[in-house]
Amino acid sequence: MSVPLYQAKAEFFRMLGHPVRIRVLELLQDGPMAVRDLLAEIEVEPPALSQQLAVLRRSGIVTSTRDGATVVYTLAGGDVAELMQAARRILTEMLSGRNELLAELRETQAGAR
């Protein structure tokens, strides 16, 4: 039995639903990175990063290659970078809307004094 598309999408977004995973994806937009470089950028213990990288790798959203003792991670496709950029645009719109509402509320509050 196949999974409905909406359910597959929900599972995909659930997989993205961790701050460390999102940060890894943001960093990998600029190109492949070694685990040691990811650790330098993300304030998390090595086992925690390893766990989150494993989730991303199992999902197929990132790939890894080994070069001696160094493991390098790469985004599996350009669509992931586009998704991260779209999320940034959506959040910017949402937050600017809140700022406009906040300014309006402050004006209303100042006028009521």
Image: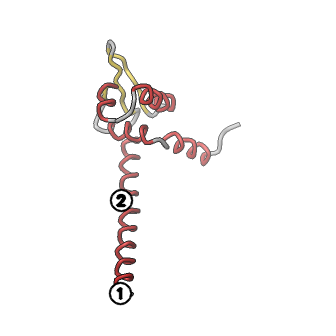
Mark 2 and mark 1: Cα distance apart in space: 28 Å
Q: Is mark 1 on a helix, strand or loop?
A: helix
Does residue 90 lie above or below 100 as drawn?
Answer: above
Q: What residue type is labelled 1?
A: Gly
Report the residue marked by disc 2: 92
What is the residue that sits farthest to the front in this orientation? Answer: 113
Residue 109: % across, % down: 38, 81
Residue pictured at 37% horizontal, 40% vertical: 23
| Badge 1: residue crowd in 10 Å (few <14, some 14–19, many ≥20) | few
Where the C terminus falls, by quadrant? bottom left
Does residue 78 lie above or below 64 as drawn?
Answer: below
Cβ–Cβ under 8 Å for marks 2 and 1: no
Does residue 61 lie above or below 65 as drawn?
Answer: below
Compared across the picture, whether 3 is left or right of 71 comes to right
User: Count the marks: how many?
Assistant: 2
What is the residue that sits farthest to the right in this orientation? Answer: 1
Residue 96: % across, % down: 35, 65
Q: What element carries label 2?
A: helix
Residue pictured at 48% horizontal, 31% vertical: 60
Report the residue marked by disc 1: 111
Residue 5: % across, % down: 60, 46
